[in-house]
């Protein structure tokens, strides 16, 4: 009984402390800030927000629920590009987003790499993958 109570107390502490966590921001290393800003604004459709550093090397974007995407221009951009390592954004109107990609000739593909195709996950969520100017993969899905 004592072991059970200790377990329940410990579990409650863990759950309470984890429920206090929220995403503040996600930082992404980019090689050319202006090219990346155009991508995240014009292709992804993010809205730029206040940038605290004011040094010409950073940009911040609202990604919802109080979280931000922080892009940082810096030398020595990582060279490993893997679709497994990706950002994911959910779109309310994915059909319009896909049409925008088609209208601007911006390439997208399915998880397996089929150009211009959509993956339907086992849970019914539709997803596509695009790359930012540095090759970072972004999953765009309709799990809005």
Image: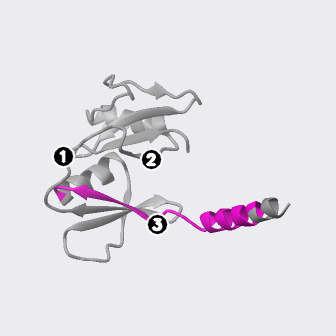
In primary-sequence order, the first of circles 1 and 2 is: 1
Q: Would you say the residues marked 1 and 2 are in contact, meaning their CB atoms lie under 8 Å apart?
A: no
Q: Residue at x 75, y 66 (%)?
A: 9
Q: Quadrant of residue 50?
A: bottom left
User: Which residue lies under the disc numbered 3?
Assistant: 24
In primary-sequence order, the first of circles 2 and 3 is: 3
Q: Quadrant of residue 110?
A: top left
Magenta stretch contains residue 34 = no
Q: Would you say the residues marked 3 and 1 are in contact, meaning their CB atoms lie under 8 Å apart?
A: no
Residue positioned most to the right: 1
Mark 1 element type: loop
Q: Is residue 134 left or right of residue 27?
A: left
Say the numbered circle drawn on residue 79. 1
Q: Nearer the viewer, mark 1 or mark 2?
A: 1
Q: The C terminus appears in which quarter of the rendering?
A: top right
User: Which residue lies under the disc numbered 2?
Assistant: 89
Separation (CA) of disc 2 from disc 3: 15 Å
């Amino acid at each position: 009984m004592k072991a059970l109570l200790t377990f329940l107390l410990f579990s409650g502490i863990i759950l309470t402390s984890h429920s206090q966590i929220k995403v503040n921001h996600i930082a992404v290393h980019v090689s050319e800030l202006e090219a990346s800003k155009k991508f995240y604004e014009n292709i992804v459709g993010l809205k730029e927000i206040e940038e605290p550093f004011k040094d010409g090397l950073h940009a911040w974007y609202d990604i919802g629920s109080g979280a931000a995407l922080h892009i940082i221009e810096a030398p020595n951009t990582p060279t490993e590009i893997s679709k497994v390592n990706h950002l994911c954004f959910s779109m309310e109107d994915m059909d319009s987003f896909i049409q925008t990609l088609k209208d601007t000739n911006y390439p997208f593909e399915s998880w397996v790499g089929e150009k211009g195709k959509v993956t339907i996950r086992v849970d019914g969520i539709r997803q596509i993958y695009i790359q930012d100017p540095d090759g970072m993969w972004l999953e765009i899905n309709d799990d809005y």
